[in-house]
Image: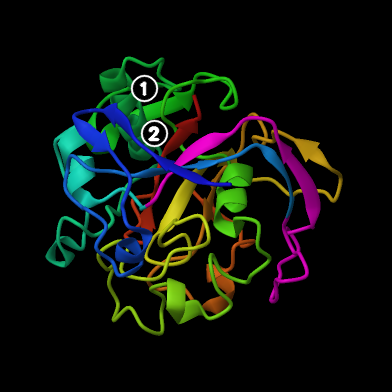
Amino acid sequence: MRRRLGLRSLGLVLSACAPAAACAEGSIPLDPRVAAYVEVPAGTFLMGCTAGQQLCDDDEAEHQVTLTRSFLIAETEVTQAQFEAALGYNPARFTDCGIDCPVESVSWHEAVAFANALSVEAGLIECYSCVGSSANVQCEIAADPYGCEGFRLLTEAEWEDAARCGEDLMFAGSNELSDVAWHQGNSGGSTHIVARKAPNACGLYDMSGNVWEWTQDWYADVSSEPVTDPSGPAEGFARVNKGGGWGSTVSYERVAMRHQGGVDAHTFSFGFRVGRLAE
């Protein structure tokens, strides 16, 4: 069972959206102080090119994943307002979309710097070590993600577990892409306000579409062997992005799709959401 719950950090009141029907209508509260989280329980699931997937790539081998720690994941992608409230600037290209649209044009380093800011304000140990600031910040992973109690990006396995939410559908929450995602065919060439499409079964919005989401992991091929608490290789040339974006075609919006993003890229279809281990 997935639970919505509240936390407090960075002056952001992390609260639930209720009733659920109101959330589905796109009325989730959006301002710099509000971000709702869902708890995803520990367990085992199938990841990659499962029976429900089509158009699979060679790097999506189906394999069994066991996650031994429950975790929290934000219901929405980090918005422009939330990012600016935390770090004091807004790097987004699509500012005309408004402050409740997802922040984009952020590098992997900027995404984890945001997570660190949440950890500092919450009195939690930071999961990353960073030098520099704003668009020039450079960060490294400072702790095992399955042991660090602070805010962070989700591992690729956590992200896909949350996106699937116990279902084997092509996209996060549906086999009909436009029901749950802003994509090349309906976005009009721009991002959109978060939580305006239907959520998946966990109550998570825009896990397919709107912006690609940075994950914690370096990209590498995966095997069909079962794994427990995977976090990718220790080094690499690109991090994994998941979920597709406003300019993506159908195959890129699938829950199993694995995109490779250079960590310094400020691409205007790259955004993120954050999470942390459950209490």
Figure label count? 2
Residue beneath label 1, please? Answer: 130
Q: Which residues are magenta?
A: 47-75
Residue occupying image coordinates x 37% and y 71%: 197
Secondary structure beneath label 2? helix
Residue beneath label 2, please? Answer: 112
Coordinates of residue 17 in the picture (x, y in percent): 31, 51
Q: Is residue 81 magenta?
A: no
Residue occupying image coordinates x 28% and y 28%: 8
Coordinates of residue 116 in the picture (x, y in percent): 35, 26
Q: Is residue 53 magenta?
A: yes
Marker disc for residue 1: none
Could you say which is closer to the camera, residue 216 or residue 198? 198
Inter-mark Cα distance, 1 to 2? 9 Å
Residue occupying image coordinates x 55% and y 48%: 159
| 38 lies left or right of 76 | right
Give the image's coloring scheme.
rainbow
The answer to whether residue 263 shows anywhere in this view is: no
Residue occupying image coordinates x 48% and y 65%: 208
Q: Main secondary structure of the magenta part?
A: loop
Could you say which is closer to the camera, residue 179 or residue 188? 179
Coordinates of residue 256 in the picture (x, y in percent): 64, 61
Q: Three-letter amino acid code at disc 2?
A: Val
Q: Three-letter amino acid code at disc 1?
A: Cys
Coordinates of residue 7 in the picture (x, y in percent): 33, 30
Are circles 1 and 2 on residues that touch, CB within 8 Å? yes
In this rendering, the answer to whether 238 lies above or below 228 is below
